[in-house]
Structure formats: C-alpha cells, structure tokens
Image: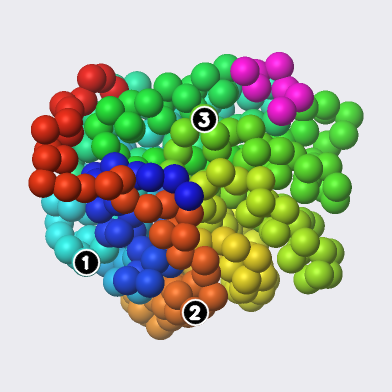
C-alpha cells in the first residue's frame, strides 16, 4: 500500500464514491471526436461544435458519474464556467496533446503546449490525466518512461493526483493490431514498468480479446491487478455498452477500482441533434452511466485498498512544502 499526500487523497476522494469506487465519465476526446462528427472532413469540426457537444453530455450524464475527464481546450474550463459540472462531481483534466507524433510503430506522446500540471491545479482540477502510447519493445519506450516520471514528479510537487492512461500498440508493422497473448502481455507489462514510475491510478485497456471467454478475461485482469503498483480503472475503448458492462463486472471482481467510461456510454449521440440528442442523453446515456457507477460501487476494489494517507499529526503543515515546478 502506498502512502499518499493529503492533496492527492482529497483529489481521489472527490473522484470516487464514498466506498472508494471510481466511475469517471471520459470526455476528453478531440481528434477522434472530430472524425466521428465529420468523417468526410474532420477539419470541418469547429471548436464551438466540440464544446457544445461536450457541455450537453456533461449536463446530462455527469450527475451519474463520480468524476468527469475533460480536455483543457474544449471542455474543462467551459464546463466550470457554465456551471454544468456540479459541485459533487470530481474533475480530471488531460495534460497531453491529442494523438501522437512519430511513426505508428514508434509513437511519441507530448504535453499540450501552453498547458501543464501547475495550471491544472490552479484551475481547480481534482486530478490530472496523462495518456501515453507505449510498448516495452518500441524504440520510444525509454522516452515515454521519462515523460511519465517527469509528469508524475510535477504532480507530486503540486500535490495533484495523476491518472496514467496507457494505450499499447504493435511495435512491428508486420504484426498489425495486438491480439491474444501479445495484447495481454503488452498491457500487463506496460503496467508493470510504468506504474512504479509515478501516477496514482492506472487507466488501462482491457487486457484480453473481446472474443475470449470470461474465464480468460478474469485471468488477464487478475494478472493486470498483480502487475500494477497502483489501483487501476478500465477504459471503454469504444466497445459496445453491453460488452463493456460484462468487462466492467469481470475487471472489478478481479481487482479493478472502477472505470473511465467514454464512448460505450455516449457514442450514439454524435449522430443525433436537437430534441433527439437531448432525449438520448437523458434517457439512455445517463441511465447507462448510472448503471456502470452502481456496478463499480458494488464490485470494485476501492482505491483506498491500494493507497492510504500519509501520517498526519498536529505538525504536518510545517513540512507541507510549496510546489517546486510543473
């Protein structure tokens, strides 16, 4: 069990149920959302269109989650400014630029220019999120490890909890998409290598193929739990809602602390408008999110099982140093 500073404890408390289950509504999508809204010409998607969609989703679905993950460009400050994100809902803000640079077999993740941990803390975020593309055998692996270590250090300086999201990929173009044993090994090994470098919650891919049986799912999720040095939550990766519910149940019973649920909850809304969009959000997406949250609260391993507060006595504030950077 790791001892967390008091600011990180408070941040994770704000992002979880009273029992300690995490159910984040993931809505930090940028380039991939542009492609969904205007597949014929993603560049035609305007900033105002992205922001309006995100705010509609936040208003309708956020109350059924424990926290919302938003980007600094089109969602986070806008949701706070309009009051759509209620005081009872935590806020997680992304740090990275959307997408990756470099070759598909040697991907590089970068921080969003002009943004960083200090600004996320200053705006009132309860936690930050860093997404990295990683494979242990990729030539960029060492650079990604340095990035994780640096961002985790900045979050420590500012006493801000960090969600570390890891997306794996094949470092050999001849192998195509990772599947089967290769997928499981990459997801588990990424957790084993990256979580000791920093971060407080791992935002992980499902470590098994959808086509595998639930026994294989459970074995893979248990292996991921054992490999991760911190609590982990399951991202949805665009799978269908019913499949995601099954994955969530298996993952939580195998040790996951909850979820960061995105397109599985709200993806149909991108093809709707006006009254149809509002009806879908209130009658379908919000119900889906509420069901996911209830499932996590019933089955998840609380984040407090992996973290505890640092000892606090009457002199704790004397050594509670000001941030050094970030």
Badge 2 vs badge 1, beta-carbon distance below 8 Å: no
**Numbered label tally:** 3
Q: Is residue 307 left or right of residue 313?
A: right
- Please say whether residue 10 is visible from this viewpoint: yes
Q: Residue at x 57, y 17 (%)?
A: 143
Task: Give the residues drawn in magenta, as a range.
Answer: 136-142
Q: Residue at x 70, y 44 (%)?
A: 188
From the top left corner, tell me how far across and down residue 250 is, in percent: 67, 70
Q: How far apart are the two marked residues, 3 and 1, measured between alpha carbons?
A: 31 Å
Instruction: Give the mark nearer the N terminus: 2 vs 3.
Output: 3
Q: Which residue is mark 2?
A: 298
90 vs 303, nearest the viewer: 303
**Residue at image coords 74%, 66%:** 218
Q: Which residue is mark 1?
A: 88
The percent coordinates of residue 309 (x first, y second) are: 31, 50
Q: Is residue 12 above or below residue 94?
A: below
Residue under label 3, please give it: 197
Q: Disc 2, disc 3: CB below 8 Å?
A: no
Q: Is residue 14 left or right of residue 184?
A: left
First in sequence: mark 2 vs mark 1 = 1
């Amino acid at each position: 069990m790791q001892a967390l500073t008091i600011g990180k404890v408070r941040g994770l408390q704000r992002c979880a149920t009273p029992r300690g289950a995490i159910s984040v509504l993931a809505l930090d999508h940028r380039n991939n959302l542009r492609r969904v809204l205007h597949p014929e010409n993603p560049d035609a998607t305007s900033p105002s269109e992205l922001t309006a969609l995100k705010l509609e989703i936040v208003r309708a679905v956020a109350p059924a989650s424990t926290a919302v993950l938003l980007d600094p460009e089109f969602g986070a400050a806008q949701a706070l400014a309009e009051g759509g994100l209620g005081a009872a809902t935590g806020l997680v803000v992304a740090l990275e630029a959307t997408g990756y640079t470099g070759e598909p077999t040697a991907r590089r993740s970068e921080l969003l220019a002009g943004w960083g941990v200090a600004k996320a803390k200053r705006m009132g975020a309860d936690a930050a999120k860093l997404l990295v593309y990683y494979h242990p055998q990729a030539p960029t692996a060492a650079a990604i490890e340095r990035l994780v270590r640096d961002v985790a250090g900045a979050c420590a300086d500012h006493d801000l909890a960090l969600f570390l999201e890891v997306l794996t990929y094949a470092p050999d173009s001849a192998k195509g998409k990772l599947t089967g044993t290769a997928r499981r090994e990459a997801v588990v090994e990424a957790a084993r290598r990256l979580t000791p470098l920093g971060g407080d919650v791992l935002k992980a891919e499902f470590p098994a193929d959808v086509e595998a049986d639930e026994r294989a799912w459970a074995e893979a999720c248990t292996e991921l739990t054992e490999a991760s040095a911190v609590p982990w939550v399951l991202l949805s990766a665009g799978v269908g809602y019913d499949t995601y519910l099954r994955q969530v149940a298996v993952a939580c019973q195998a040790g996951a602390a909850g979820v960061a649920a995105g397109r599985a909850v709200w993806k149909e809304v991108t093809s709707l408008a006006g009254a149809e969009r509002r009806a879908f959000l209130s009658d379908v997406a919000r119900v889906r999110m509420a069901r996911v949250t209830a499932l996590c609260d019933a089955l998840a391993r609380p984040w407090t099982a992996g973290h505890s507060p640092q000892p606090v006595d009457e002199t704790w504030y004397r050594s509670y140093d000001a941030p050094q950077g970030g």
